[in-house]
Amino acid sequence: MQDSPGDEDMDRITGDARIVREVFEAIPAAVAAVENPGDYRLVAVNAAYRALVARDEVLGRSASELFPELVAQQLFELFDRPFRTGETVTAREWRVQLPRATGDDEDVYIDCTIVPQKSPTGEVVRLVAFAQDVTERVRDRQAARRRAAEAERDPGEPVDVVGVLQRQLLPAGLPILPGLQLGGSYLPAGGGTAAGGDWFDAVPLPDGRTALVVGDVAGRGVEASAAMGRIRSVLEDRLDHSGDIGEALAAVDRLASRLPAARAATLCVAALDPADGRLTYCTAGHPPPLLIPSAGPARFLRSSGGGPLGSGAGFPLAEDHLDVGDQLLLYSDGIVRRSGEEVVAGTAELARVAADVAAGRVLREDWLAAVDRLTTQTLELLVRTSGHDDDIALLAAQRTAPPAPLLLDLPAESEAIPAARKALDEWLYDLGTRAEDVILLRHAVGELVTNAVEHAYNGTPGAVRVRAECTGRGMVEVEVADDGHWREPWQPTEDRGRGLAMASDFADDLHVETGPRGTTATVRHRLTRPARLLTAGEVAPPSASDDLPELLLILEQPTAGPQRIRLDGPVDSATAEQLREELVVRTRGGTTPLTVDLTGVTHLSSAGVAVLFEAETRTDAPGRPFLLYAPPGSPAQHVMSMVALPHTTTEPG
């Protein structure tokens, strides 16, 4: 029988426990232990953790109840994985917003490692998280990046050809429109060292609608970007001219028949009428848009059918509707086909995260428009968990209440000049106008109001009227009118007589009408807001290691019928050329039947789709010339159904 511990032993045990506690409390990293998956009950925390979250009474309480704002920030996703897999999880430089006693939220960046603790039977019973506040390090790097961007470029410094090319091929800005707010972001694949073929665009149509476009050209590099540029130019020209989606798609389809690099490109084109919310769209082999109502659950629109350019599948249209406040998100497939993610799971995660962002449940950035939060925070939350190996383009549109025109009726006195400038500034900023455009229009309109005050009435009482309106073509029109008499300008001197010339220089267009009842001067100026070309460092933490690329295995399968091969692994931009060469050899240039089993394909990107389309159209053998097989629910079957690539879900033979 074992003796119970004496007083001396108890003192030693108590002393050891005190030392352990002191050491645990003194650890500079924040340490927390949680139990119960989904509940995350805190069973141990140290002083650094309590300081990080600025709370003392946390033991025994549920982390998800203590910090509900972190649920939508996907922080607890880090805990789900080790509970599920039993493997250690690491996150680097995650941005987390923590509430403070002042009522404000504070951005904190953390490095975090979560280690599962297991029972003797191998069951995960507890997680221990080690978090380090690296906010200062991230802020220093962000400041250095800003300084580098603002500094004057050294003539001897190498030019970022990829960045320059990508910026030239993306829209310089998105139009500012009445009743419709637009935001767009583009994130190149990986390190952004090669130009890509994804893009977005917004084109005001002649009938007051706006065409929203997201497209994806197969492959990467200069050839893909050049093909993207040509498709975008043709599409924009046709949409601007006629506003007919079907006609514009037919035009780029003809281009694809002459331009091999454009074949198998996918497009989503949606025409939205901000006046009544009517939406007409086509998903040409492309994922359908996500509709996020201001009230109610998010939902993906149904596919309109049709296939990629050059597939001969046609371009049928579908319709839907947006209420005021609703948001529509168009995207390229890189956001749902991230590394290690099944397409179906990635699609569901996109809907959930985008809905949380749109509802303001994620990161508070009230200075950003809703569409800008949707296209940046959604990227940040999804990409930081899995990384990305494909370009991602996001375009968001929100239907809003149309702005009232600016109407001023002022006495033709000197006080009217600053009053008109101030009212115009406020009206333009409410539209979301960039500062440089506000300055230009302020000067142009100021010169016109000055002319009316000083010259229209020749010293007699009168009035000057200012009317400003934003048009459905992305232009602002400002009229300055008076009831006086037109006076031909004198020969201008150094300080007088240059008002009209200056107003003309400040705006895109100036038109003056004179008559016996007065003068009306109208300036027109195109308004845009910037589109964002992001870098991986802006939306995702740096990679912890350089992972080796995943290999594509091509295995020959014995069969009594036509030859058959099986693919295992990703069919993406890195492996597409390998597959193209294999298919050419196996089909002897398209003269021999071949069955391709895609059961083991883990990822089928646009580059892989282009190769399969090419082989399907090239092969001309009797019987079953080229047969693609993928079981129902597999990643390849999901993608091939979406892009209308002919295939079978029934096991051949």
Image: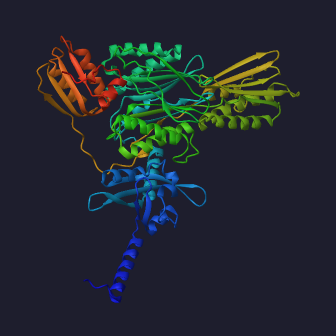
Estimate the x, y position of residue 129 in percent, counting from the top left: 38, 60
Looking at the image, is 159 positioned above or below residue 134? Answer: above
Image coords of residue 212 (percent x, y):
50, 25
Residue found at the very far top of the displayed protein? 622
| Residue 321 placement, left or right of 352 | right
Quadrant of the snapshot with the C terminus: top left
Q: Is residue 473 above or below residue 96?
A: above
The residue depicted at 44 percent of the width and 38 percent of the height is 350
Residue 380 or 320: which is nearer the viewer? 320
Which sits in the foreground, 162 or 106? 106
Q: Residue at x 34, y 37 (%)?
A: 342
Relative to 473, residue 155 above or below: below
* Residue ranking furthest to the right: 460
Q: Quadrant of residue 284?
A: top left
- The percent position of residue 192, horizontal first and vertical second, equals 35, 38
The number of callouts visible is 0
Q: Which residue appears at 35% of the width and 32% of the height?
A: 195
Is residue 575 left or right of 23 when viewed as pictured?
Answer: left
Position of the N terminus by quadrant = bottom left
Left or right: 572, with 169 as reference point: left
**Residue 114 visible in image:** yes
Residue 165 in sight from this viewpoint = no
The image quadrant that residue 181 belongs to is top right
Residue 305: % across, % down: 41, 19
Q: Where, by quadrant of the figure, is residue 180 drawn?
A: top right
Chosen colour scheme: rainbow
